[in-house]
Image (cartoon, helix red, strand yellow):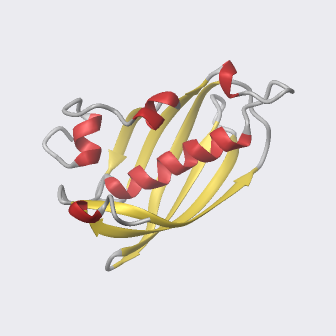
Amino acid sequence: MSERSGPFWDGVNGRSPMPRAAATLGWEFIDADVDNGTIRLAFHATEDFTNPTGNVLGAFLAAMLYDTVGPALLATLQPDQFQSTLEFKVSFLRPVRPGRLFGNGRVVHRVGDIAHLEASLTDADDIVIATASATARVVPLSDAETVA
């Protein structure tokens, strides 16, 4: 994958710094299948992410899912393209304690500049703890700062 370039691949391959939000989540690239539009990531949920009962706060789980669906699409794009999320929905299935979590994302369908995405977040035992679906628009990289 080191031959690919663009904001996503430059970060994965160490040619540019990891976004601070991803670093906060302990974001780790595991694998991507560009042809099939799938990605596997890992995150490290720390004690700092917990609610009063010791479970990882849902907002952090949502952020991990958000940082899975976006890269699923970003990994497939050309170097001069980026993505802008239009809609994002999360379902929380069970509580989870801090530790290593895994994000599995995929591009479900893409027509033109609109893509439908989905992701799941699993614990170390491969039990699904949360899922997400999203719709995103592919935009020119030069326009990425001006779109919502």
Q: Can you give x and y, in whole percent of width and height, for residue 32 in the image?
A: 35, 46
Residue, x 19% and y 32% (percent of image)?
A: 15
The vertical placement of 147 against 74, above or below, is: below
Residue, x 58% and y 44% (percent of image)?
A: 63
Give whichever of 123, 138 is nearer the camera.
138
Q: How many marks?
A: 0
The vertical placement of 137 against 1, above or below, is: below
Q: Can you give x and y, in whole percent of width and height, for residue 51 in the image?
A: 79, 30
Task: Tell me: 111 left or right of 58.
Answer: left
Residue, x 53% and y 42% (percent of image)?
A: 103
Task: Tell me: 29 left or right of 131.
Answer: left
Which image quarter holds the N terminus?
top left
Which residue reaches farthest bottom? 111
Which residue reaches farthest right? 53
* Quarter holding residue 64: top right
Q: Can you give x and y, in whole percent of width and height, for residue 144 in the image?
A: 31, 60
Task: Tell me: 138 left or right of 16.
Answer: right
Which image quarter holds the C terminus?
bottom left
Which residue reaches farthest front? 146
* Quarter holding residue 146: bottom left
Q: Can you give x and y, in whole percent of width and height, for residue 66 in the image?
A: 53, 50
Task: Tell me: 117 left or right of 88.
Answer: left
Give whichever of 90, 42 is nearer the camera.
90
Which residue reaches farthest top? 47
Residue, x 48% and y 54% (percent of image)?
A: 69
* Quarter holding residue 128: top right
The vertical placement of 140 against 63, above or below, is: below
